[in-house]
Amino acid sequence: MWRGNRWGWWLLGVAIWGGTSDAADPLFQRKKNLVYANVHGVGLLADVFIPTGRSNGRGIVDVVSGAWHSDPGKLRDHERAQIFEIFCRQGYTVFALRPGSVPKFTALEMAEHIRAGIRWVKGQHRDFSIAADRLGLIGASAGGHLASLVAVTSGPVGGATDASVAAVGVFFPPTDFIEYGTVTLDPVKPGPLNETLRRLAFAPGEIAGYSAAQIKQRVRSISPARLVTAQAPPFLLIHGGLDLLVPLQQSRLMVATLERNQVSAKLIVKPGGGHPWPTIAEEVAVMAEWFDRQLLASERPDIP
């Protein structure tokens, strides 16, 4: 599906998002550029969106990453998709984490940064009046990959290192870099897709001297669909039916693996949708309602 795409993988972060966002939107109060962790002297930042209306006492951790970069432009993409407006309208407090970028950090390092961010949120749950054990995790594209990776590899629940979440919703995530649509990826070989995979899986120069088996194992270690266990939280995946950048097969494979492990999983395919699509805010609203059922239904008998 990717074969012949001369634009390469970097397009994961530059598609046009639908929707608009007003900086003075009364639906939330925004706290900008909070440092949630330090890595080798580098501060990792989060913006927090606090609903100004009724709070439902739940938090959503939003992984802000496109093409595995976390620059402010990726945060604006999420604004344009109305993620913060829609979730805050539903009463959620949203924690938009920026986990860093390649090539400075690998996917495994960025995943650990997200875990640190989840622990940071849980450590402040009283300040934000949210339930530490009922967090949701979301992401799109590269952010969806990282969110999925964290969700299926974090645990155990409880204790100082707990980075577990109660439910995960992701848009068009890469989930398996071994079985990637119709394309065979190899981080040793040239080409934009293979080079991106190499930066994700290995620090600069690290791949030299690794055996073929070791390289495959490292690629597997950043492929969420290869790491699912029965302890994974419920998942909702939303994917465009005409996505030319991340094959729909990636979401289908993830759902199939979750279901084989008896984990609740649902896939919504947007007919004609690309990567993403102009009306994606409609699907963001669908995702917010799904989180209501996952995080609030036990306390809200009015939620079907």
Image (spheres, grey):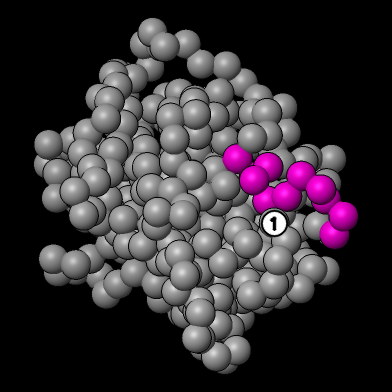
Q: Is residue 15 above or below residue 255?
A: above
Q: Is residue 244 left or right of residue 200?
A: right
Q: Give the camera-side residue of 190 and 97.
A: 190
Asked which secondary structure carries label 1, the reply is helix
Q: Is residue 290 above or below residue 181?
A: above
Q: Give the camera-side residue of 20 and 178.
A: 178
Q: Would residue 304 be seen by someone viewing this image from the given angle?
A: no
Q: How many marks?
A: 1
Q: Is residue 235 left or right of residue 189?
A: left
Q: Specify the quadrant of the image occupied by residue 33.
A: top left
Q: Position of residue 276 (x, y in %)?
A: 69, 38
Q: Position of residue 295 (x, y in %)?
A: 38, 50
Q: Position of residue 22 (x, y in %)?
A: 47, 11
Q: Residue at x 30, y 37 (%)?
A: 46
* Crowd class of label 1 (few under 14; some 14 to 19; many from 20; radius 10 Å): some
Give the quarter of the figure containing the N terminus.
Answer: bottom right
The span shown in magenta is 3-13
Q: Specify the quadrant of the image occupied by residue 175.
A: bottom right
Residue highlighted by disc 1 = 192
Q: Residue at x 34, y 20 (%)?
A: 28
Q: Give the camera-side residue of 2 and 24.
A: 2
As drawn, which residue projects farthest toward the top? 24
Q: Residue at x 51, y 50 (%)?
A: 68
Q: Give yes or no for residue 112 being in the magenta stretch.
A: no
The three-letter amino acid code for the residue at tag 1 is: Pro
Q: Is residue 141 left or right of residue 203?
A: right
